[in-house]
Image (tube, grey):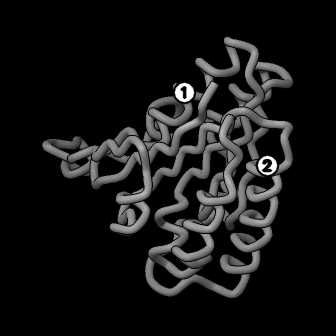
Amino acid sequence: MKGFVHVYTGDGKGKTTAALGLALRAAGAGLRVFIAQFAKGRDCSELHSIRQLGPNITLRQYGTDRFIIGAPSEEDVESALAGFAEARQAVCGGQFSVVILDEANIGTYYDLFSVEDLLDLIEQKPAHVELVLTGRYADRRIIERADLVTEMREVKHYHRQGVAARVGIEQ
């Protein structure tokens, strides 16, 4: 089976959710999935679900317990670079059929790793690996290189009325 490059981007809700849905579908078909979450390091409901699903999905977080706004800390950069190295191994190592780099676009936007490194990873991707890149601010070069691009656009969101992220829905 040929693997493609997906990009889920935009300012709307649902990028990570779409990627996790793909992971669930792939695992149900017996495929091994690796999920690298960049700029995320806090406990969230998907971590608990994935642990219960069994051995076909591996999820690793490379970030601190806060979301990056503004300049990333040295700790943020170090964590992201370590995660990118592990993600590269997941893409090229032959163990996984689907690799999801959650918030990879945020990673390049905040200079946690370079767009050039991400493009290089896309070029090194074995033909059978499905690669999914999520996050706002997808670089135009990533969009041009991808096989599938979906832009989530916020039309209306209850967050604007002061509703905090809810366990099991947004976190």
Q: In front here: 70 or 92? A: 92
What residue is rendered at 70% in x and 37% in y? 47
Residue 49 x %, y %: 69, 25
Frontmost of labels 1 and 2 is 2
The residue tagged 2 is 90
* Amino acid identity at mark 2: Ala
The residue tagged 1 is 22
Mark 2 residue element: helix
Residue 85 sits above or below residue 21 on the image: below
Q: Which mark is residue 166?
A: none
Residue 104 sits above or below residue 53 on the image: below
What residue is rendered at 54% in x and 27% in y? 22
- Whether residues under marks 1 and 2 lie with C-beta atoms below 8 angstroms apart, the answer is no
State the separation of the CA atoms marked 1 and 2.
17 Å
- Judged left or right of residue 44, residue 90 is right
Tell which circle, 1 or 2, labels the residue nearer the N-terminal end: 1
What residue is rendered at 45% in x and 33% in y? 18
Quadrant of res 124: bottom right
Residue 5 sits above or below residue 67 on the image: above
What residue is rendered at 82% in x and 55% in y? 89
Residue 26 x %, y %: 64, 21
